[in-house]
Amino acid sequence: MTCKDYELRRKAVKLKGFVYSYIDRNFPGYIQSMDGIAWLRYGKTTLELLIENPVNLYRLLLEHYGDEDSADYAMKMIYLYPLSLFLGDPGLQEELLRCVKQGDEDRFKEILKRLLCSV
């Protein structure tokens, strides 16, 4: 199933809104703090990085937390869990984290696009 570019962009905006609300509600102040760091480093918010360049988001978390276990946990529970909820597949976070850690952004984006088109 394919969807038009404008439809995909519209759904991506809804996805970002959902993830932002989830993080802000469950981790008050977290996203604003991390967005400040992401903006200084990459000129993008963490949610833009999540969609466009998830490997850089993971690197940012790894540098911020200082160890792989903490970065994995933050990536999975703070960013990938609400993303996978929006896409209707809560178990997806493990596969997406694996893609990010392997540097396979193309696969990450392919999964994201396929599922966004079906939402």
Image (cartoon, rainbow, N blue to C red):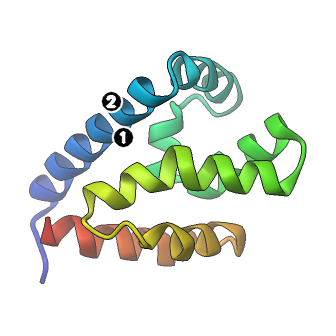
Q: Residue furthest bottom?
A: 1
Q: Is residue 50 above or below residue 100?
A: above
Position of 22 with respect to 119 (left or right) is right
Residue 84 figure quarter: bottom left
Are discs 2 and 1 less than 8 Å apart at CB? Answer: yes
73 or 37, nearer to the observer:
73
Question: Could you tell me residue 113's position as x and y percent?
Answer: 29, 69
**Which residue is denoted by mark 2 in the rendering?**
21
Question: Could you tell me residue 63's position as x and y percent?
Answer: 84, 40
Q: Residues within 10 Å of mark 1 (few under 14, many from 20)?
A: many
Could you say whether the residue bearing mark 1 is in a helix, strand or loop? helix
Position of 5 with respect to 40 (left or right) is left
Which quadrant: the N terminus?
Answer: bottom left
Question: Could you tell me residue 62's position as x and y percent?
Answer: 80, 47
Q: Which residue is drawn at the image coordinates 42% and 68% (left, top)? A: 109
What distance separates the C-alpha of mark 2 from that of mark 1?
5 Å
Could you say whether the residue bearing mark 2 is in a helix, strand or loop? helix
Give the residue type at disc 1: Val
Q: Residues within 10 Å of mark 2 (few under 14, many from 20)?
A: some
Position of 11 with respect to 81 (left or right) is left
Q: Is residue 20 visible?
A: yes
Which dot marks residue 19?
1
Give the residue type at disc 2: Ser
Position of 48 with respect to 113 (left or right) is right
The number of numbered badges drawn on the structure is 2
Q: Which residue is drawn at the image coordinates 18% and 58% (left, top)? A: 8
